[in-house]
Amino acid sequence: VFIISFIFFQEKIPKNTEEQSINLSSLIAKTKSEIRTGHKIQIQIQNGCGLSGIAKVYTNFLRSNGYDVIEYKNAPHFEYKNTQLIIHKKDTSDFIDEMIQTLQIKPNFITYNYDNKIIYEMTVIIGHDYNNLDSYNEVTMHYEPF
């Protein structure tokens, strides 16, 4: 009985590691610009409106859309009326329009503060207009369960 069950019920064991490997990069979302350039943009999110948890929600939203949010924190103050995008690296032009479309913010709230000492390419400061942004309905779906 043991020999018969061994013959008929043994699991197929892969012969080489190619059958066993999983392409993990296929599990991580990529932006259109990353697909085109091969570079994953790094972003900082700041809470500039004072609403508790807003930076984390936008972090979750951007990460699910393929962005590498490496830091989220409070802004120096909570008096930002409008959501702003601050560009820190000169070679990010491929990503600026995409970020504007993803967040659906107004292009006139983009500033340039080039600084090679900063490791991320952009900073997004969430202002008091967060709930008026066209992206807000989608962003609110990225609350983490408690």
Image (cartoon, rainbow, N blue to C red):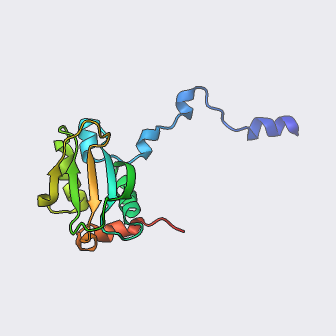
Residue at 26% from the left image edge and 48% from the top image edge: 122
Question: Residue lying farthest top?
Answer: 16
User: Image check: 65 left or right of 16?
Assistant: left
Question: Residue lying farthest bottom?
Answer: 132
Name the quadrant containing residue 139.
Answer: bottom left
On the image, the x and y values in percent for residue 110 come to 16, 55
Name the quadrant containing residue 61.
Answer: bottom left
Residue at 34% from the left image edge and 49% from the top image edge: 66
Viewer-closest of 48 and 93: 48
- As drawn, 38 above or below 138: above
On the image, the x and y values in percent for residue 126 come to 28, 63
User: Image check: 108 left or right of 52?
Assistant: left
Residue at 41% from the left image edge and 42% from the top image edge: 26
**Count of number-bearing discs:** 0
On the image, the x and y values in percent for residue 18 come to 52, 29
Question: Residue lying farthest front?
Answer: 76
Residue at 37% from the left image edge and 66% from the top image edge: 54
Name the quadrant containing residue 104.
Answer: bottom left
Question: Residue lying farthest right?
Answer: 1
User: Image check: 28 left or right of 33?
Assistant: right
